[in-house]
Image: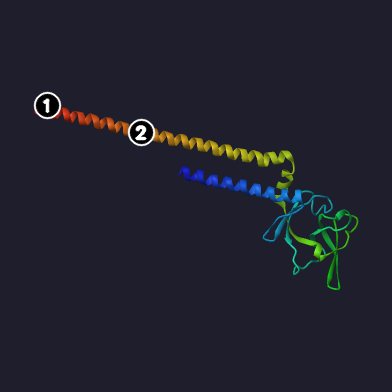
Amino acid sequence: MKAKKNKIFSVIDCLIITIELVFILVLTFGKIFNKTPSIFGYSFYSIATKSMTPTLKVNDVIISKEYTDDMKLEIGDIITYNGTTGSYADKKITHRIVDIEETNGITYITTKGDNNPIEDPIITSENVVSKMIYKTVIISFLFKILSNFFGFLFLIIFPILFLLISEIIDYIKSSKEKDDEEENSEDVNSNQSIETIEIKTDKESNIDKLNE
């Protein structure tokens, strides 16, 4: 029963560590390389500036669905797009749509940060990467903590060390218990052998007496 419980806790420990590591790798990868891995058509983005305050704050994490041609965009939607001009060039921008116009089959989109005084340069639907569907409160909170060195230390490094140390202690205890069981088993076998020899000796002595 105890071994079964230890096994269950070991599996849970591994799952926790795996989820934490995957979460960190996904967000870190996106920040460093300005590329966001997509999982089943959904992506995680962390907000880097105050341009969308108070709707989206720095280090908030949003879940966005990859844009496709059949996806409907409306004024008020928050989208992520590839910037092409000025200070927006080669950057992923997450702003709100304030105007949409279609000319000769081309969809022109105007966006603006909620906290910005002016609109962004006009883009087309070809520049759109994804559309925000949800702001994750829990993940945003965790990411804000992870963005801080001490938060990363206490939330990730210390728990991992604690789990590893716990696993080592459990392994040492189980090994010791196994050794004790083997020693006890050897003692029992030894005692049985001694009793057998004594019984055999007594029998031989009785036989000798009868022969006399």
Looking at numbered disc 2 in the image, what kind of residue is underneath it?
Answer: Glu
Q: Disc 2 or 1, which lies upstream in sequence?
A: 2
Residue 132's x, y, as percent? 75, 59
Q: Secondary structure at mark 1?
A: helix
Does residue 162 lie above or below 26 as drawn?
above
Q: How is the image coloured?
A: rainbow
Image quarter of the N terminus: top left
Residue drawn at the location 39% of the way across and 35% of the way down: 182
Residue 42's x, y, as percent? 70, 59
Residue drawn at the location 37% of the way across and 33% of the way down: 184
* 194 left or right of 135 in image: left
- Compare residues 96 and 103 and report the one nearer the observer: 103
Looking at numbered disc 1 in the image, what kind of residue is underneath it?
Answer: Lys
Tag count: 2
Q: Which mark is residue 209?
A: 1
- CA–CA distance between discs 2 and 1? 35 Å
Q: Residues within 10 Å of mark 1 (few under 14, many from 20)?
A: few
Which residue is the extreme one toward the bottom? 104
Residue drawn at the location 74% of the way across and 44% of the way down: 147
Q: Which mark is residue 146?
A: none
Residue drawn at the location 77% of the way across and 52% of the way down: 34
Residue 114's x, y, as percent? 85, 56
Q: Which residue is mark 2?
A: 186
Quadrant of residue 111 in the image? bottom right
Q: Secondary structure at mark 2?
A: helix
